[in-house]
Amino acid sequence: MVKVMPLQVEGWTAVGVEVQLPKTTLLAVTAGPGYIMCGALDVQLLNEKLKDRQIVAGRAVGVRTIEQLLDAPLESVTDAAHALGITVGMRGRDALRILAESAS
């Protein structure tokens, strides 16, 4: 099952996506030019093999719901996300605020 839902995060609108797969659930929330995602996100791949795309993304591990993803500290971020001020340890909702503000 796939769920797509609008979310109000820190006064900004984001889009949450939940994909239920066998034995795992993929979670992502996007705002502005980037997104945060569960542990399935391969930040190293984005930074190395897809570097030319300048993908803005952050990864939180150990999360099972969108709400947990919003509250969890980011375990890793892409170089492009770091350039916007998104850092390791920052809560997901704080990273989304930066993404939303950078889009306006």
Image: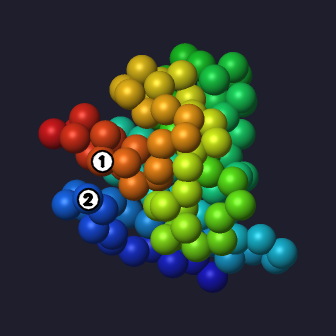
- Which residue is more in the foreground, 21 or 59? 59
Q: In which quadrant of the rendered image does the C terminus lie?
A: top left
Q: Amino acid at mark 2?
A: Glu
Residue pictured at 37% horizontal, 48% vertical: 94
Q: Is residue 14 visible?
A: yes
Q: Amino acid at mark 1?
A: Arg
Residues under numbered marks 1 and 2 in contact, where contact means CB atoms less than 8 Å apart: yes
Display coloring: rainbow
Q: Residues within 10 Å of mark 2 (few under 14, many from 20)?
A: few
- Give the side of residue 100 with respect to residue 25, left or right: left
Residue pictured at 67% horizontal, 46% vertical: 41
- Which residue is more in the foreground, 64 or 20? 64
Q: Which residue is mark 1?
A: 97
Q: In which quadrant of the rendered image does the N terminus lie?
A: bottom right
Residue pictured at 56% horizontal, 29% vertical: 78
Q: Please tell me which of labels 1 and 2 falls first in the chain.
A: 2
Query: In the structure shown, which secondary structural element does the residue marked by tag 1 occupy?
Result: helix
Residue 10: assigned label: 2
Percent coordinates x, y for residue 69 in the rendering: 54, 61
- Give the side of residue 27 with respect to residue 70, left or right: right
Residue extending farthest left = 104
- Which residue is more in the foreground, 22 or 13? 13
Percent coordinates x, y for residue 25 in the rendering: 70, 71
- Give the side of residue 79 with respect to residue 44, left or right: left
Percent coordinates x, y for residue 17 in the rendering: 50, 67
- Which residue is more in the foreground, 46 or 97? 97
